[in-house]
Image: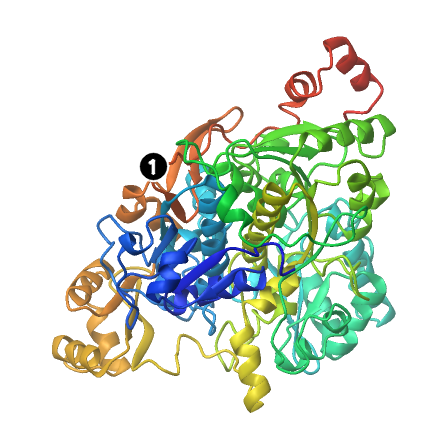
Amino acid sequence: MEALLAGIRVVDAGGEPVSLAGRILADLGAEVGPATPRALARADVVIETPGWPGCPVLDPADAPDAVWVRVTPFGLDGPRSGWRASDLGIMAASGNMHATGDPDRPPVRPSEPAAYAHVGPEVAFAALSGLARGGPAMIDVSMQEVVLAANMCAPARLARTGEHVRRRGANIGRTREIWACRDGWVSFGLRGGKARAASLETVTRLCIEAGIAPPEMAAIDWTAWSHTEAPDDELKAIEDAVARLFALRTMAEWYEVACETNLMLAPINSPKEIYGSAQLAARHFFDPSTGRPRTFVHARAPVLDGGFRRMDGIHRQERGGNDGAGPWAGTKILEFGSGAAGPIATRYFVEHGATVIRVESKTRPDFLRTYALGPGNPFGLEGSVMLDGLNVGKLSVTLNLKHPRGVALAGRLVHWADAVVENFAPKAMRGFGLGYDTLAAGRPDLVMVSSCLNGQTGPHKDYPGFGGQGAALSGWNFVTGWPEREPVGPFGTITDSLAPRFVATALAAGLLYRRATGEGVYLDVSQVECGVYALTDWLLHYRKTGEARGRNGNGHPRALVHGVFPCRGDDRWVAVACWTDEDRDALARVVGGADPDALGAWTSTQDREEVAETLQALGIEAIPVQGFEDLLADPQLAHRGHFVTLDHPVMGPGPYERNGFRVADAPGGYASPGPTLGQHTREVLAGILGLTDQEVDALEADGALD
């Protein structure tokens, strides 16, 4: 691992929000250290948080040839660029907090800093993007914009469909996600779709064996069942039976059942279960002497070589000039997989100039496309706002990977690509004949990333699951909610948006390594391990003290004031934090007291924006807790051009989201909306592979393009 970024020198002059970024780059092999005159003079990258308490004020003239990554709560310009915000405020501004928690309580954030967990890998990716562009660069990172990716295109769904998301506690949509068991909680999504049918059949069998299945449950064809269309009484009867079933066993017993039967169920892990994980132990995830996660990615060199080439200084010597293009212009990526975790990773590259071809199937469409087949959607498989938004700017080709000619076409596209990204289950690509060893035999310079729930090795590598299971296994459910209630959220099942940032960073490091050495690399990223890696401080606290810090609502052990308070209007809130005696005293002078009751009584008579403006003028952190409708009208996001309008060929015009950073003097954004299924098949086969219309017709007739 240490060779990927060997030779890169990073000055980490930032505060707590970016501490994870420096660690990520160091674990990838960069030399990371504090800001000293000598370090700045030699730096390839400088990471800073201007205005963050206790951080040095640096002059870009001290490192004129470096990539400068400047990270602030809301970006370097715009109407809210001067506002103060910590993790609490960023989560409030992102929309994610408003949708997380119980309907009878204030919106809630994870007790561990989720915003900083998202910011760390995106800052690392931004730094590597600056290096990829060549020459010095100034990169402006807005923490608010970074976290918006965790909403899984919910603002766009609201704009297109009018779908308002409200806090639903342990539910996702109409159905429950978190269930009590004998000694804790488990995550199990009672939702339809082909990918979940086998798990629903297993749960039905177990309910029947336990004698608690209602008559209608045994008769359901789960391959065709839709949780969005099921009658209320049927759904309640099923939920009651499932709740009784899960109460019969412990978390460990249910996880054993899940691993044996491929049931999509996961325990809500605390540090104890995470440190005791057989899967993490098999992958040597923890340093046994410190308890610290070793890294978030497992890498190996091409099968024909077997080792990494040392390359100290090569990046610095071979960086090209700045030609005004996006950092990843000219980079070609071939993407396989489904869902959210893979597409979000490659979307970062698309926004900054790369060409991404997404391989899909007509006969086995992405399950996010089939989610769109619910009531009220007139567009069929082309009506998934989420899939559209996650794949904006990409090309779509349909290939039948169970057909030899379809696989052969995929192999030819691999020779076109600089990198392959896939998030299938571990056996899938090898089963298609497209495993890394096979591909690297003909393309030793190929960079390939595999990203699945548990990684490519270990006793639980074939265990299936989505983001809900990833959030449970990695500890994020355990730290989200209220101490006397069940765990919840976070909204958007955090690992689905967190892990792709790590995947993108690993891929960027692999591409820089290839550019410098001419050699490829294989990168194995576990989504669960990314989630655990981001909770390192939480784990080390447990290892040191034996205390498993759990859910504490919106409290914070170091803050003098830290919470969410009601404002005038329906479900309107403001997040307020004081970190010093001076802040608290200033708050007390305005409010008449700084205790929660006095503060809540004062805020409840005012608008959110009025509270925020009044307190921010005094230097006190105060941020409106924004819903998704508020994001679409947010003046700061509008100033930064976060939402761009594109015209989808079926759904029509709609908003698409940029990610969290801008590279000065470089273009960014998207040339087109998300593709329709197979929209570019003929274009790609003709333009890239040189096939004639007659050859494409023959492939289509033969079923190779299904």
Name the one closer to the observer, 342 or 198.
342
| Residue 634 pos. (x, y %) | 30, 48
Tell me the quarter of the picture where residue 607 sits.
bottom left
Q: Residue at x 68, y 29 (%)?
A: 416
> Which of these two is toward me, 331 or 72?
331
The residue at the far left in this view is 589
Task: Report the residue that reaches farthest toward the bottom.
Answer: 545
**Residue at x-position 82% and y-position 66%:** 459
Residue 273 vs residue 406: left or right? left
- As helix, strand or loop, the secondary structure at mark 1 comes to loop
Q: Quadrant of residue 307?
A: bottom right
User: Where does the N terminus fall, quadrant-wise?
Assistant: bottom right
Would you say residue 163 is visible in this rendering? no
User: From what the image shows, is residue 537 above or below residue 206?
Assistant: below
Q: Position of residue 625 (x, y in %)?
A: 33, 61
Q: Give the left or right position of residue 186, taking residue 129 as reference.
A: right
Residue 560 located left or right of residue 656: left
- Name the foreground residue: 636 vs 185: 636
Which corner quadrant of the image does residue 639 belong to?
top left
Residue 351 percent coordinates (x, y): 47, 38
- Left or right of residue 590: residue 659: right
Residue depicted at 51% across the width and 29% down the height: 651
The residue where tag 1 is placed is 665
Q: Residues within 10 Å of mark 1 (few under 14, many from 20)?
A: some
- In the displayed structure, would residue 549 be above or below residue 451? below
